[in-house]
Image (tube, helix red, strand yellow):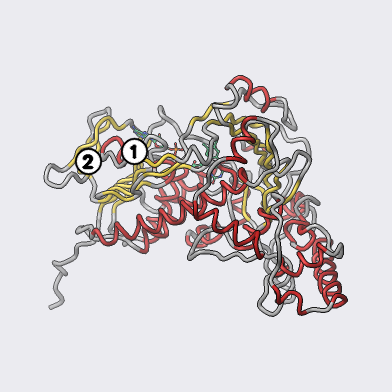
Amino acid sequence: MIGVDMTDNRIGNIVIVGGGTAGWMSAAALCRILHRDCKIHLIESDEIGTVGVGEATVPHIASFNKLLEINEPEFVRQTQGTFKLGIQFNDWGRVGDSYVHGFGSLGHDLSGIAFHHYWHRAYAAGAAKDLGAYSLNTLAAPQGRFMVSAADARKDSPLAQIAYAYHFDAGLYAQYLRRYAEARGVKRTEGKIQQVLLRPNDGFVDAVVLESGERISGELFIDCSGFRGLLIEDALHTGYEDWTHWLPCDRAWAVPCTKVGPPTPYTRSTARGAGWQWRIPLQHRTGNGYVYSSRHISDDEAASVLLSHLDGEALGAPRPLKFTTGRRKKFWNKNVVAIGLAGGFMEPLESTSIHLIQSALSRLGLLFPTREFSPVLTDQFNEQSIFEHERIRDFLILHYYATERRDTAFWAYCASMDIPDTLKNKLALFKDSGRFFREGEEMFTVVSWVQVMIGQRIELAAHHPMADNLSGPELREFVEHVEKVIASCVQAMPPHQAFIDRHCRADYTQIP
Ligand SMILES: Cc1cc2nc3c(=O)[nH]c(=O)nc-3n(C[C@H](O)[C@H](O)[C@H](O)COP(=O)(O)OP(=O)(O)OC[C@H]3O[C@@H](n4cnc5c(N)ncnc54)[C@H](O)[C@@H]3O)c2cc1C
């Protein structure tokens, strides 16, 4: 007789607290990867609401959509989405500067040496254009061109591997994921949690109690309750590491405006006197926000700076957001895993928050516990999460620190602040010899770092000596060839709007 496995200690009951982007991404991913009998219960409060921003992503989201088997045109249509080839940074190195941090590759590496070394040599000799001319994304973005990878392109053509992400309406994205998760059995309860009950013996969370008196218990709790961290902080007092001294922006105003032209296939970030302004084009409107340091500008002044720099007409009054940049000391504590803003927050300069939700879910999948909650799994989860956050933190600090701006107290502070040793070492190596190494599984690639370092006017004392192996004419020919290939590929790309119209145009009349 085939017996029932009495030793099954798999988790069978998960409670997700929060129904923002993090809560619904967690619900959608977990119902996809966990065993059929595992119950997933999501609680959200309409009265508290969600943060409601978070509309620009990075290319890694493709693997999340693949896991969910999402149909891309349908997804873009339903979220009023557009495509993103990178981020344009204006006025960051100096007022008047503009560069694009494009996704994907840069130029063409030769004999194992990264392209930027050859570029540096050629540029110094006056034989190369600005770095952006050698990246498909960077060149295509300001020209407003976009397409997904061409299936019929030669394997080595830049058109065969176009890296891109999305802009989408945060509210519609959460609704999309909610439909997905509920259709696969996730139970949703609307209500405000009033109390968190801990098990007396070990301090694990036992249940949450709603205002209605309903008690919902679980074995594993995913805290997606936003900045406050209802379980991870209020109940478990995990602690928070504050990074405001390195990333001084602590507030934002957000406001959508009417669109005034075809959507750009990139996010725009414009440095302002006490922070920076984002511009995220969607199909039906444009999202805008001013992320600023409250020590350097008043709230009223910041709101008026934002409103005076919109492309179109503001659709409503700006909404204020306050945050403390940093991370929870532990992302996983006892039987609570904090995902999304409950785990920490770094400003949206490189659109990393949704990615951090996704990578936390992937890590949770890989380190998924049994009812025993082995501390070894928990420690590993925390170690990897901390590493990931700290490397992203360094990349963001780079944008502020590597500036020649001193025109306001904010920029003077950024340029003179002490920075983490990990970043100091990377900068020293790059300035000295153009070398850069991606550490372990850190999020940003060498190409990302190089584009931002060069874009922020960091000067190299030298390049790799092997880039001198080409003769002068060989070098010129190589660099010109790369430029020509990129330019001709960009010419073959359709306008972004035409691509959307053809494949995934949303129905504007469906917008609430
Ligand atoms: C200014 C700004 C700009 C941003 N831009 C980007 C961007 O461009 N790209 C990007 O990737 N990310 C961005 N982010 C981050 C992104 O918005 C968040 O990562 C994302 O929205 C996830 O939020 P969340 O779900 O963790 O929290 P929230 O949206 O705050 O959701 C919290 C949920 O918890 C529920 N809740 C809280 N307390 C209770 C309670 N007591 N009882 C019941 N339910 C409760 C709420 O009802 C809500 O459903 C930005 C963030 C900010 C602040």
Q: Position of residue 3 (x, y in %)?
A: 14, 73
> Residue 219 or 295: which is nearer the viewer?
295
Vertical side of 205 occupied by 60: above or below:
below
The answer, for residue 83, to whether it is visible in the render is: no
Q: Does residue 100 appear left or right of residue 200 in this picture?
A: right
| Figure quadrant of the N terminus | bottom left
Disc nearer the start of the sequence (1/2): 1
- Is 422 left or right of 57, judged from the image as shown? left
Residue 190 appears in the rendering: yes
Image coordinates for residue 352, horizontal then vertical, percent: 54, 49
Q: Quadrant of the C terminus?
A: top right
Looking at the image, how many numbered discs can be counted on the residues? 2
Question: Mark 2 and mark 1 in contact (Cβ < 8 Å)?
Answer: no
Q: Looking at the image, which residue is at 68% across and 70% down? A: 114
Residue position marked by numbered label 2 in the rendering: 207
**Residue type marked 2:** Ala
Q: Secondary structure at mark 1?
A: strand
Q: Nearer the viewer, residue 115 or 64?
A: 115
Q: Say the numbered circle drawn on residue 189.
A: 1
Tell me the distance, in whole angstroms, between the alpha carbons under discs 1 and 2: 14 Å
Q: What's the residue type where badge 1 is placed?
A: Thr
- Which x, y percent locates residue 378? 29, 57
Q: Nearer the viewer, residue 132 or 316?
A: 132
Question: Within 10 angstroms of label 1, few (less than 14), some, or many (20 or more) residues?
Answer: some
In this rendering, would 70 be left or right of 7?
A: right
Q: SS of the residue at dot 2?
A: strand
Q: In this picture, is 293 found above or below 219?
A: above
Q: Nearer the viewer, mark 1 or mark 2?
A: 2
